[in-house]
Amino acid sequence: MIRLTGLTLLAALTLVTAGCAGMASRSTSASAAPEIAASYSIDPGHTSLVFKISHLGASDFFGRFNNVSGDLRFSENDLANSSIRVVAEAGSVDTNNGDRDGHVKSAELFDSGTHPQIVFEGTGFKSVGRGAYKISGNLTFHGVTKSLTVVAQKVGTVSHEKFGDRIGFTSTFVIQRSDFNMGSGMPASVLGEDVQIMVGIEAILQK
């Protein structure tokens, strides 16, 4: 029979405690390692880009873009690695009226023949709490590039056996059409100056 004296028992407990502390330290260090931002591709079929603008000060009308694509790199634990690029084809604008669509695509407004794409590139991600992120970047519209900061809300993530790993965000923000030299001959009393943009993005993890 092995007998442990009080001193021997104390020494054994000290060794065990030290070993557990070392394991905990190693575990903490491993969990604190930076996470590499995952790459996603925006799913055009489940992404919406809608705008709203005042007409004659009497009502608001809405339009959308039917062709939106892009990519996302995102890491909640290392936002310095996160970025997003969203591309809307200007010629895919749809206001539910063919004549109005033609006017919006014309040189007076979008001039989609000369400037076929509307692009937002965001490289600065900052958490503002509750799953929301402030994203700073540049918006290029009608051949003009302006800095733009938006707040995007993370909707959720899902891992689906058929549709893969997905993540979604929504954002609503306002731009001024005059900042992008659109409709300079149209006063705000005819066509509103503020353009509200609502976007919902669903992106698929690339493996």
Image (spheres, grey):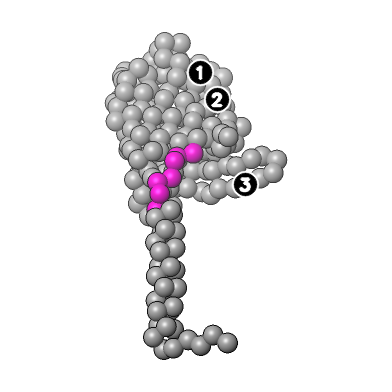
Kindly report the distance in space between the C-alpha atoms of the residues bearing marks 3 and 2: 25 Å
Which residue position holds label 2?
67
Q: Earlier in the sequence, mark 3 or mark 1?
A: 1
Kindly report the distance in space between the C-alpha atoms of the residues bearing marks 3 and 1: 34 Å
Closer-to-camera residue (127/90)? 127
Q: Earlier in the sequence, mark 1 or mark 2?
A: 2
How far across and how far down the image is residue 186, in percent?
34, 21
Above or below — where is 146 with respect to 171? above
Which residue shows up at 38% across the image and 38% down it? Answer: 81
Badge 2 element: loop
Which residue shows up at 47% across the image and 34% down it? Answer: 72
Foreground: disc 1 or disc 2: 2
Under mark 1, the amino acid is Gly
Contact, mark 1 vs mark 2 (Cβ under 8 Å):
yes
In the image, is 111 to the left or to the right of 156? Answer: left
Above or below — where is 63 with respect to 91? below
How far across and how far down the image is residue 154, in percent?
47, 47
Foreground: disc 3 or disc 1: 3
Badge 1 element: helix
* Span shown in magenta: 32-38
Under mark 3, the amino acid is Ser
Contact, mark 3 vs mark 1 (Cβ under 8 Å):
no
Which residue position holds label 3?
159
Under mark 2, the amino acid is Asn
Closer-to-camera residue (34/116)? 34
Which residue position holds label 1?
91
Which residue shows up at 37% across the image and 22% down it? Answer: 141
Considering the whole magenta stretch, tell me its main secondary structure.
loop
The answer to which quarter of the image holds residue 14 is bottom left
Total marks drawn? 3
Mark 3 Cα within 10 Å, few/some/many (few <14, many 20+)?
A: few
Above or below — where is 181 with respect to 154? above
